[in-house]
């Protein structure tokens, strides 16, 4: 039941976000849309979500911590060098999985 | 050229324009499908999620939070914060409301995703008009690929071995999105604050650490200069 409530409320509200501004020519003149916090907030939510996963210092095995760190560095470097979001994500994840697989056996 | 053939040609033009980036949604859809199944959703619920929300990041976020048993309000609010950018996309397309009926715009706005907006924006930046057929062609192509890849992920999800740690893929997708969009020092500061603060506040129940850390980080990074001046 909880899942359906989440899906329907998020779905309907997302639709309204996509529909209402397009239908009101005055909407894009509203000042809050131009506020910097409005543009930064989605990024901060994403960062806050991945923070505890990528910084797992509580009871996490060393192999997981090391492979996550390596994967993260790989993603950051790939994006800075190639500007490819998908490429960065895939390479970082690939390095994480491979390193974790071998480190789990070693450590 | 008749009105219907104009509509068909702009529809085809929309499909062709979105094609190069449309295939980028396939792996994300597969990963979402697999993550959703891993998070306890049924195949039907996974498909319903893609039908109702059509937003990769928000869907993965919602599923991750459902899996971690966060409060309903926290899940919905977090998903909405991720989707806030759609308000900006939609406002940018408000010119369409002068020429087209509300019913047409209602249908089109359902298909307004990141990739669709990128395609439409390339026309807007050249000061070209967007035909509803073009919008529909681009949006529908992305929608079909998203639904198919979600289904493939939901079905294949059970077959994926545990050593793949499929749940972590969404972290890398989010990390890549954040890194791609963080160009100024101010934004990087905000992102780092959110990341560390959320990890520090992990003990807070209902996953409220995400919302608290994100709000504080957004406030701090947009008021950095004012705070520095007052010190």
Image: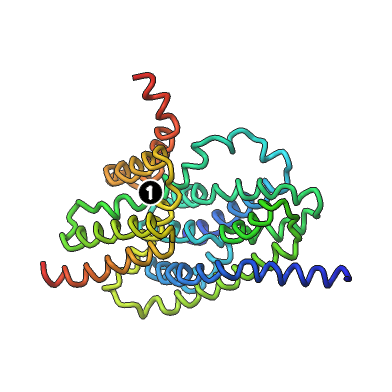
Does A7 appear above or below B201?
A: below
Between B94 and B184, the one nearer to me in the picture: B184
Residue A56: image location, x then y, percent: 23, 53
**Residue B222 falls in which quadrant of the image?**
top left
Between B212 and B3, the one nearer to me in the picture: B3
Q: Residue at x 43, y 53 (%)?
A: B180
Please identify the quadrant where the C terminus of chain B is shown. Answer: top left
Q: Secondary structure at mark 1?
A: helix
Q: Is residue B5 left or right of residue A31?
A: right
Q: Residue at x 37, y 69 (%)?
A: B38
Chain of the residue displaying label 1: A
**Residue B172 falls in which quadrant of the image?**
bottom left
- Using a 10 Å C-alpha cutoff, classify the residue at mark 1 as few (fewer than 14 neighbours), some (14 to 19) or many (20 or more): many
Does A39 appear above or below A95?
A: above
Residue B220: image location, x then y, percent: 40, 33
Q: Residue at x 50, y 75 (%)?
A: B151
| Residue B89 shows in this picture | yes
Does B227 appear above or below B219?
A: above
Q: Is residue B25 left or right of residue A63?
A: right
Residue position marked by numbered label 1 in the rendering: A47
Between A12 and B156, the one nearer to me in the picture: B156
């Amino acid at each position: 039941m909880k899942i359906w409530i989440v899906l329907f409320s998020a779905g309907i509200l997302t639709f309204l976000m996509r529909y209402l501004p397009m239908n009101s020519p005055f909407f894009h003149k509203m000042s809050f849309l131009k506020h910097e916090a409005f543009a930064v907030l989605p990024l901060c939510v994403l960062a806050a979500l991945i923070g505890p996963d990528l910084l797992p210092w509580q009871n996490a095995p060393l192999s997981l911590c090391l492979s996550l760190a390596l994967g993260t560095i790989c993603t950051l470097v790939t994006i800075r060098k190639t500007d490819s979001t998908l490429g960065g994500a895939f390479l970082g994840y690939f390095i994480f999985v491979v390193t974790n697989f071998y480190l789990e056996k070693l450590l | 050229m008749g009105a219907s053939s104009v509509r068909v040609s702009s529809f085809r033009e929309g499909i062709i324009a979105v094609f190069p980036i449309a295939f980028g949604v396939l792996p994300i859809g597969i990963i979402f499908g697999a993550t959703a199944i891993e998070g306890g959703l049924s195949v039907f619920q996974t498909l319903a999620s893609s039908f109702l929300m059509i937003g990769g990041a928000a869907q993965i976020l919602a599923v991750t939070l459902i899996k971690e048993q966060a409060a309903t309000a926290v899940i919905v609010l977090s998903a909405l914060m991720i989707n806030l950018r759609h308000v900006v996309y939609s406002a940018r397309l408000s010119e369409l409301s002068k020429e087209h009926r509300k019913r047409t715009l209602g249908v089109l706005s359902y298909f307004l995703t990141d990739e669709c907006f990128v395609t439409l924006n390339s026309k807007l930046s050249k000061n070209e008009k967007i035909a509803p057929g073009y919008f529909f062609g681009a949006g529908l192509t992305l929608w079909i690929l998203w639904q198919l890849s979600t289904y493939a992920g939901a079905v294949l999800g059970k077959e994926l071995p545990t050593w793949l740690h499929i749940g972590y893929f969404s972290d890398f997708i989010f990390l890549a999105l954040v890194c791609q969009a963080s160009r100024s020092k101010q934004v990087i500061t905000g992102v780092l604050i959110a990341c560390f603060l959320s990890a520090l506040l992990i003990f807070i129940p209902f996953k409220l650490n995400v919302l608290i850390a994100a709000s504080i980080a957004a406030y701090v990074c947009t008021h950095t200069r004012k705070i520095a001046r007052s010190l």
